[in-house]
Each structure stands twice: as C-alpha cells, then as structure tokens.
Amino acid sequence: MNIEVGKWYELNNGEKHQCTKIKGDGFYVLGGFYYHSNGVVLWGDKDSPRSVKRELPEEVDLTKINTPFGLLSEGTQQRLRDWPHGLEVYGPNGWTEFQWRQCPTAPIPDVTYRAKLAPESEKMVYWLNVYPDGVRVHQSKEEALRARDRECIATECFECDPDGSNPTIYVEETE
C-alpha cells in the first residue's frame, strides 16, 4: 500500500484520518503524525498502533474536507459538485460561502472546497397540558398556557421528526 494525499485511512488503533499533505522531506501527514509512504508511522513498525491498517473506501465526509480539490479522488470531486446544500471555499478570510456559478473557472485544483452542512429537518412541535386523567394537545405554548386550569399538573413541549422519530419532551412549567 502507498499512502496518497486526500485518501482516508484506518490506523491499527481504530482511528480514521485523511492524509492531508506531504512534507518536504517526503513524509506524509495523517492526524498530525508523520508516515512513510508504506503507511508505517515514523519511528514505528507496521504493527504500531498508529500505523495504517487499511485504506478506507471513498466515503469522505464532504463537510470536513481540508484538501485542495485537485488532490481529491474523482468520486469525491463529483460528490462535491453534486452537493445540494451549498459549498464553502477556503480563502484569506477563512471559510466563506461559495457557489460554482460564482466562478466560471471553478473548480480550481489548488483551492479547497467543502460542503456546507445539510439543514436539520423541520421538527414537529406540540404543547401538552398534563392532567391526572390525560393530556390535552395544543399548537403553541401560548395556547397551552391560556388553556391551563387548576387541575393541570404540567405543561410540556413535545418535539419529533416529521416521521415521529427522535422524540424529545421538555417540561416547561410544573406546579
């Protein structure tokens, strides 16, 4: 195996790192450590915990890329081009928003692009007044608080994903 800049590797200790650069002395860098081209950590052997165990398949997290576009694999380059949630480009002022149509010569091989995080899905939110004999559901906190009466034990906020998964309940007021 020969290490390549832009590819991801799993180490013997289970850590996963992207090869980010080649130092002037011919060593590769993964996770801040120096490596020989065969994946052996500097001053170690192939069985050292920090030596490379294997190259990882091409499922790079597009939001964490820190490698120039020209050094990415063709598959990763295409995934960046197709990313529907927008991109960021690294420049003199750090990461800034970028769109392919802003630069007709893009992508530039020496420039680093990464994907913007996908927006979180809209949560469904319900407000509940809890009573000894059951629950009454309301569309807003204000509505739930207006509808409270002496028998109400608590007002809670219930939120979940549109499919009902990932439910969370917050107790807003308790008597």
Image (cartoon, rainbow, N blue to C red):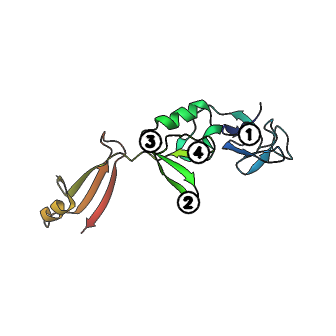
- The mark found on residue 101 in the picture is 3
| Structural distance between the alpha carbons of marks 3 and 1 | 42 Å
Dots 3, 1 in contact, CB < 8 A: no
Q: Which image quadrant is residue 109 in?
A: top right
User: Which numbered dot is residue 65?
Assistant: 4
Look at the numbered disc 1 and give the secondary structure of its residue.
Answer: loop
Q: Earlier in the sequence, mark 4 or mark 1?
A: 1
> Closer to the N terminus: mark 1 or mark 2?
1
Q: Earlier along the polypeptide chain: callout 4 or callout 2?
A: 4
* Dot 2 amino acid type: Asn
The type of residue carrying mark 4 is Ile
Mark 2 neighbour density, 10 Å: few (under 14) some (14–19) many (20 or more): few
Left or right of 168 on screen, residue 64: right
Residue 77, x across and y down, in percent: 56, 35
Q: Residue furthest bottom?
A: 175
Q: Say which residue label 1 marks.
A: 12
Labels 4, 3: front one: 3
Marks 4/3 in contact by CB < 8 Å: the verdict is no
Marks 3 and 1, the one that precedes in the sequence: 1
